[in-house]
Image (tube, rainbow, N blue to C red):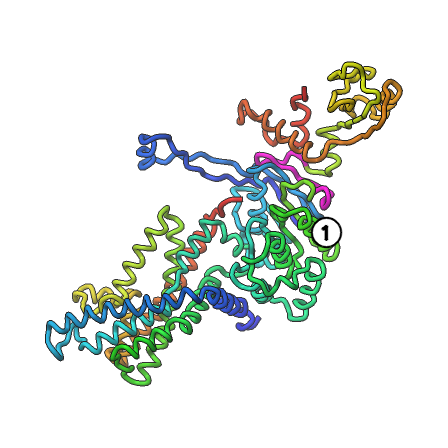
């Protein structure tokens, strides 16, 4: 099948927000006339998801991630634009479409709060018409991978957040959906629980070749799970491609960090190494930030080792958090003076080229 | 797909709702007393009114034992058909919890009503039956006029549960559109308790009001089953009342569907 699992074109969602005038006079005015502003949450978003693909959908708070997911899952009707998912229009064919999707909203649960977890699973079994045999087989798999078996007799309110999330993940996969939406599946989880959830998702994606779209604030999720990221900010797609590509394009830096022995006389805040400057991090420890577009890291390394009494040395890249933070910042700075003046579309990459250089 | 296969998810919803309420069963023991006190208050009010008129007097066509029976069977019935579908659906929309329902291949109205019926089944066992027994032991309540009157009373009571569910689903959807959900719900309770005949039998209403009320759904929630129990509505009279009750139930279920379709597009699930 060459059709993409999900095809999104020019998706737009605007909300009417009533504007309140301040003070008593404003409140009185509001009684008779309410002024509304239109807020664009999702602004001409387009992308495809291939079958079996696992894609990270990232962006800062309020970027429009959840709004997009709600439209893709059929909860919200878009203002304009098209979505075809598994051959359905989600909000129009909701009941037929939702048979083949699974959804996890990390901040909510689809389990009944006060009764044993297993009762929620029984209900789901009936909702999706899962046969006894399939049910037993799948519950066995969930128990193997997520260790949910011992949680089944307990009421949800007694579970820890990590335990609840494992149950929610299993619940969303009970009917073996072909398309899985995960909205913040690791929110609030500790390191161990996060690792559990990630390895389960990897496994599930491999076993069932489920198409997965994952929104998260935790970019480690993305680094571990997704080959591809779609990055949005203020409702627009800023990047759609690999994580490596995102890094190379927006923050093509290497950091050379080294310890000197003996410590240079006077413990200077900056050292000259050929044409480059090394900044002091701690006593005897310095760092050079290499712009990879201008020079190769190896060239700089050679000079460092030749010119200085290097005791120890490490080369690193900015982590993905930093790259993304940079993009958000640049996008915000670019937009600040006049929102409306921004060229239509805000194509990926544009932002970085015009971005403010770090001083 | 067979009808049973189609109904299975909704039976499961009813069952789950039943189980969920079991988790709260302690709350219901207090509820039993609340209903008992309510019926008791009305017992003394009516006793005082009848006492004034003298022994063997009738008010609105009711003797005192009949009135007592009308009041107590009415409160017992209410403990069965009562549900908070309206509040539940309105708060689901408000809090964005409806999202968790919309991502499932279920009919929202059918699911909501199944849960309401699951709740009624629960209430029947832990609530209505003990209340009925308690009231029967304490007060001289008249037995049903005949076995068939009792059967029709049960049928009418079941229809009441569906009718209240249908009304509440509509009220919940209307309440979402206002900023004061609680205000709408409070107004609804006033209207329902007054017009259903729970507080005052419909026979006490002025003639013109009664003529209108007969054609509205409300009095069929309480007044109709009450009069059937007492044998005040029999034969064609009872049949007409039951037909109106059933007709309104179907009409309001359909209205609920129309309202849902009109509302679903507008529902903007909060947060995220």
| Residue B267 horizontal/vertical position (percent) | 46, 49
Q: Is residue A3 visible?
A: no
Left or right, B188 with respect to A133, comes to: left
Q: Which residues are magenta?
A: A222-239
Task: Chain letter for mark 1, please.
Answer: A
Question: Is residue A229 part of the magenta span, yes or no?
Answer: yes
Residue at left offset 34%, top offset 35%: A30
Left or right, B206 with respect to B4, comes to: left
Residue at left offset 24%, top offset 67%: B41
Badge 1 marks a residue whose secondary structure is: helix
**Which quarter of the picture shows residue B221?**
bottom left
| Residue B110 horizontal/vertical position (percent) | 47, 64
Q: Is residue A260 depicted above or below A90 in this figure?
A: above
In this view, the residue in front, B164 or B250, is B164
Question: Is residue B239 part of the magenta span, yes or no?
Answer: no
Left or right, B85 with respect to B16, comes to: left
In this view, the residue in front, B131 or A51, is B131
Q: Is residue A206 visible?
A: yes
Left or right, A243 with respect to A168, comes to: right
**Which quarter of the picture shows residue A97?**
bottom right
Q: Residue furthest bottom?
A: B147
| Residue B251 horizontal/vertical position (percent) | 37, 64
In this view, the residue in front, B222 or A287, is A287
Number of labelled discs?
Answer: 1
Provide the residue designation for mark 1: A199
**Which quarter of the picture shows residue B59?**
bottom left
| Residue A254 horizontal/vertical position (percent) | 77, 28
Residue at left offset 59%, top offset 25%: A333
């Amino acid at each position: 099948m060459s059709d993409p699992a999900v095809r999104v074109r020019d998706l737009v969602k605007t909300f009417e927000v009533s504007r309140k005038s301040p003070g008593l006079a404003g409140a009185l005015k509001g009684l008779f006339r309410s002024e509304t502003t239109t807020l664009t949450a999702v602004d001409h978003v387009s992308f495809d998801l291939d079958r079996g693909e696992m894609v990270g959908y990232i962006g800062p708070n309020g970027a429009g991630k959840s709004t997009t997911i709600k439209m893709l899952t059929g909860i919200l009707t878009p203002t304009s634009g098209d979505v075809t998912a598994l051959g359905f229009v989600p909000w129009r064919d909701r009941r037929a479409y939702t048979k083949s999707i699974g959804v996890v909203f990390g901040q909510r649960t689809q389990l009944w709060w006060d009764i044993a977890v297993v009762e929620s699973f029984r209900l789901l079994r009936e909702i999706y018409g899962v046969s006894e045999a399939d049910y037993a087989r799948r519950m066995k798999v969930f128990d193997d991978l997520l260790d949910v078996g011992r949680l089944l007799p307990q009421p949800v309110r007694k579970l820890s957040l990590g335990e609840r999330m494992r149950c929610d993940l299993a619940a969303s996969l009970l009917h073996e959906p072909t398309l899985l939406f995960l909205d913040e599946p690791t929110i609030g989880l500790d390191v161990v629980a996060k690792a559990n959830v990630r390895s389960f998702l990897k496994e599930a994606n491999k076993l069932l070749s489920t198409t997965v779209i994952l929104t998260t604030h935790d970019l480690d999720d993305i680094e571990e799970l997704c080959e591809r990221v779609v990055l949005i900010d203020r409702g627009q797609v800023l990047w759609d491609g690999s994580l490596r590509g995102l890094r190379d394009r927006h923050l093509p830096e290497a950091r050379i960090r080294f310890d000197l022995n003996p410590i240079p006389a006077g413990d200077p805040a900056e050292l000259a190494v050929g044409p480059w400057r090394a900044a002091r991090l701690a006593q005897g420890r310095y760092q050079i930030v290499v712009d990879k577009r201008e020079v190769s890291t190896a060239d700089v390394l050679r000079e460092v080792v030749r010119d200085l009494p290097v005791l120890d040395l490490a080369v690193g890249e900015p982590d993905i958090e930093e790259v993304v933070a940079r993009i958000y910042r640049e996008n915000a700075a670019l937009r600040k003076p006049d929102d409306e003046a921004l060229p239509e579309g805000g194509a990926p990459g544009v932002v970085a080229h015009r971005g403010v250089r770090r001083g | 797909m067979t009808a049973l296969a189609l109904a299975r998810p909704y039976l499961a919803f009813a069952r789950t709702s039943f189980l969920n309420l079991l988790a709260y069963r302690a709350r219901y023991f207090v509820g039993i007393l609340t209903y008992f006190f309510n019926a008791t208050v009305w017992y003394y009010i009516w006793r005082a009114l009848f006492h004034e008129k003298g022994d063997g007097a009738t008010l609105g066509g009711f003797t005192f034992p009949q009135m007592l029976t009308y009041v107590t069977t009415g409160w017992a019935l209410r403990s069965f058909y009562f549900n908070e579908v309206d509040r539940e659906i309105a708060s689901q929309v408000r809090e964005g919890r409806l999202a968790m329902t919309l991502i499932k291949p279920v009919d929202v109205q059918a699911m909501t009503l199944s849960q309401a019926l699951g709740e009624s089944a629960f209430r029947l066992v832990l609530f209505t039956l003990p209340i009925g027994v308690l009231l029967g032991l304490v007060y001289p309540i008249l037995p049903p006029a005949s076995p068939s009157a009792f059967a029709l009373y049960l049928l009418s009571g079941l229809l009441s549960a569906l009718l209240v569910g249908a009304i509440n689903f509509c009220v919940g959807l209307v309440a979402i559109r206002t900023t004061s959900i609680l205000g709408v719900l409070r107004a609804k309770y006033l209207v329902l308790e007054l017009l259903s005949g729970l507080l005052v039998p419909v026979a006490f209403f002025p003639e013109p009001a009664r003529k209108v009320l007969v054609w509205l759904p409300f009095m069929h929630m309480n007044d109709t089953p009450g009069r059937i129990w007492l044998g005040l509505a029999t034969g064609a009279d009872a049949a007409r009342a039951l037909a109106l009750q059933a007709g309104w139930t179907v009409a309001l279920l359909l209205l609920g569907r129309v309202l849902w379709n009109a509302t679903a597009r507008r529902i903007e699930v909060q947060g995220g």
